[in-house]
């Protein structure tokens, strides 16, 4: 009898050992992985989780964490596989709500919007880290995606390629007005002396530029300005001429999540530093994405200073006079209960593009557009799947001729994190709003009758009710760039104390020219 019990004991022992072999959250490897996971180092966390998976393949929490890591790396097929492992093996799992939530997000990203809605509804009450408001917003985004999917859009969208994009972030494309080039801010390595952030592997931001030549953008190179080389500034907008910049910088020592800075250089030799634009705009919270309308002297920007509880940002505006900015006010037309993190204000004030993760998005952050009609902004509309995806579309700029838009997106087919894409815009705008978003660039040089360069002030006036008069300074060699809205006549006056006053009328009533070259010769006073 004892022999039989002994044999039975040997038979049961391996099974008892197997049954007792459970993964403990306090396991050292799990602790390591948790540290990486909570620090958003998903690759490092996944490596450890997969090592544990070889021994604990049925552990539900481990499968959930692996799925979240794969999701963060845009590998939705593998995320789906591990979530289904939990859902199919134990419908009563204590992690079933989390599994349903992440399964809904995963198939949403894979384009199965109808099924995503059914799984979102299973957790409509919310889960630990995502309350019911967030889940309801995701349901709304799924319905928006279903609606947008049936709208036909035939606008070519291309990644700008390896001359511009890298394995890092390329953000805030800004098209220059005075030269055929695009600015891009990046967190890649640009010089030997840089150290990467030990957690993210990213470097301090640098501002680069690429010139458009031979029908393509060349390789990025550093902008020749004091803020460009790994100074952690983000360039968000430029003026019409050279040397006028709006920037953002997050200086941790100020504990305010970042401020807007402004810089206007006198000439190429000016090495002035960007200046904080002050408390009329900046607050103790985030203030960024400043976009300058240098025609109407307005600055639009994104801030969460109006949100006492959360971090959701809204669009504000401030009037710009010379080097100062007025007290800012919210643009209520664009306000939602979610996050408006970016804004582009087209010079002349014809339209605005902003990024939001509200319920009208098709997933993540989308680009929305609103046009000015009868001095009021129209209801913002999603720009559709030509511009947006189920990932995040964050930034927007427009070529001076209005032909192409340049956006940033973290689509999985990109080179790295956020990439820059080019999309047909003029065709989109004409088909949706029945007019062209045109501007005319007037460029030239002021000289005297002896051919000497003249530094002067130029005033531009017109009879348009929706545009202010402009006053422009030439650079040290007399060169100038002025950007105006066509469709009217402009009066240009050039003043310099040593020369006779110069005045002319420039008729742009029927002009289709995007660029006009205009050199002015002044007469010396007798």
Image (cartoon, rainbow, N blue to C red):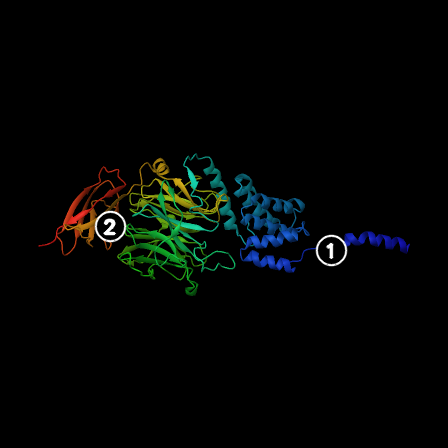
Give the residue at x 62% y 46%. Answer: 82
Dots 1 and 2: beta carbons under 8 Å?
no
In the rendered image, the quadrant that contains the N terminus is bottom right
Q: Nearer the viewer, mark 1 or mark 2?
A: 2
| Label placed on residue 20 | 1
Closer to the chain start, of discs 1 and 2, is 1
Determine the secondary structure under disc 1. Answer: helix
User: What residue is drawn where x is 16% and y is 45%?
Assistant: 504
**Neighbours of disc 2 within 10 Å: few (<14), some (14-19), many (20+):** many
Cα gap from disc 1 to disc 2, whole angstroms: 79 Å
Residue 281's image quarter?
bottom left
x, y percent for residue 13: 80, 54
Disc 1 residue crowd, few under 14, some 14–19, many 20+, Cα 10 Å:
few
Q: Give the camera-side residue of 16 and 274.
A: 274
SS for callout 2:
strand
Image point 16% across, 55% down: which residue? 496
Residue 315 horizontal/vertical position (percent): 37, 52
Measured as percent of width and height from the top left, residue 247 is found at 36, 56
Viewer-proximal residue, 159 or 53? 159
Disc count in the image? 2
- Residue 337 is at least partly visible in this image: no
Which quadrant would residue 30 be assigned to in this image? bottom right
Observer-nearest of 6 and 239: 239
Residue at 45% x, 55% y: name it.
189
Q: Is residue 329 left or right of residue 479?
A: right
Q: Is residue 232 above or below residue 72?
A: below
In the foreground, 227 or 84: 227
The label shown at residue 480 is 2
């Amino acid at each position: 009898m004892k022999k039989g019990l002994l044999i039975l004991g040997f038979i049961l022992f391996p099974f008892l050992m197997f049954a007792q072999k459970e993964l403990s959250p306090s396991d050292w490897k799990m602790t390591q992985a948790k540290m990486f996971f909570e620090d958003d180092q998903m690759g490092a966390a996944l490596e450890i989780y997969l090592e544990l998976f070889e021994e604990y393949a049925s552990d539900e929490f481990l499968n959930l964490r692996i799925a979240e890591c794969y999701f963060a790396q845009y590998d939705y097929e593998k995320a789906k596989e591990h979530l289904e492992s939990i859902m199919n093996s134990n419908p009563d799992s204590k992690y079933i709500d989390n599994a349903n939530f992440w399964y809904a997000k995963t198939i949403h990203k894979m384009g199965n919007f109808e099924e995503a809605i059914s799984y979102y509804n299973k957790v409509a009450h919310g889960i630990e880290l995502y309350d019911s408001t967030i889940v309801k917003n995701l349901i709304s985004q799924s319905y928006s995606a279903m609606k947008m999917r049936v709208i036909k859009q035939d606008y070519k969208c291309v990644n700008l390629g390896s001359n511009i994009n890298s394995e890092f972030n390329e953000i805030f494309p800004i098209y220059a007005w005075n030269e055929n080039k695009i600015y891009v801010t990046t967190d890649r390595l640009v010089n030997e002396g840089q150290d990467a952030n030990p957690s993210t592997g990213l470097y301090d931001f640098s501002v680069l530029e690429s010139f458009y030549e031979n029908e393509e953008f060349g390789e990025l190179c550093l902008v020749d300005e004091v803020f460009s080389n790994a100074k952690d500034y983000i360039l968000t907008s430029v003026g019409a001429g050279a040397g006028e910049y709006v920037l953002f910088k997050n200086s941790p020592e100020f504990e305010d999540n970042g401020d807007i800075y402004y810089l206007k250089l006198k000439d190429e030799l000016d090495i002035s530093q960007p200046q904080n634009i002050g408390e009329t705009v900046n607050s103790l919270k985030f203030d960024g994405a400043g976009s300058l309308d240098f025609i109407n002297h307005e600055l639009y920007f994104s801030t969460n200073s109006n949100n006492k509880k959360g971090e959701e940002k809204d669009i504000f505006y401030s009037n710009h006079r010379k080097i100062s900015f007025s007290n800012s006010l919210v643009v209520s037309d664009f306000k939602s209960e979610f996050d408006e993190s970016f804004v582009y204000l087209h010079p002349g004030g014809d339209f605005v593009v902003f990024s939001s993760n509200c319920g009208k998005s098709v997933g993540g952050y989308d680009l929305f557009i609103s046009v000015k009609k009868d001095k009021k902004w129209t209801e913002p509309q999603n720009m559709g799947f030509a511009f947006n995806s189920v990932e995040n579309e964050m930034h927007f700029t427009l070529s001076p001729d209005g032909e192409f838009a340049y956006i940033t997106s973290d689509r999985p087919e990109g080179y790295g994190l956020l990439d820059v894409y080019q999309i047909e815009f003029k065709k989109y705008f004409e088909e949706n709003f029945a007019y062209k978003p045109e501007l005319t660039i007037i460029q030239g040089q002021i000289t005297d009758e002896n051919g000497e360069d003249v530094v002067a002030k130029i005033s531009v006036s017109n009879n348009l009710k929706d545009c202010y008069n402009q006053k422009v300074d030439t650079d040290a060699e007399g060169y100038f760039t002025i950007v105006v809205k066509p469709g009217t006549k402009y009066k240009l006056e050039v003043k310099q104390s040593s020369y006779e006053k110069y005045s002319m009328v420039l008729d742009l009533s029927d002009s289709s020219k995007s660029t006009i070259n205009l050199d002015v010769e002044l007469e010396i006073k007798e």
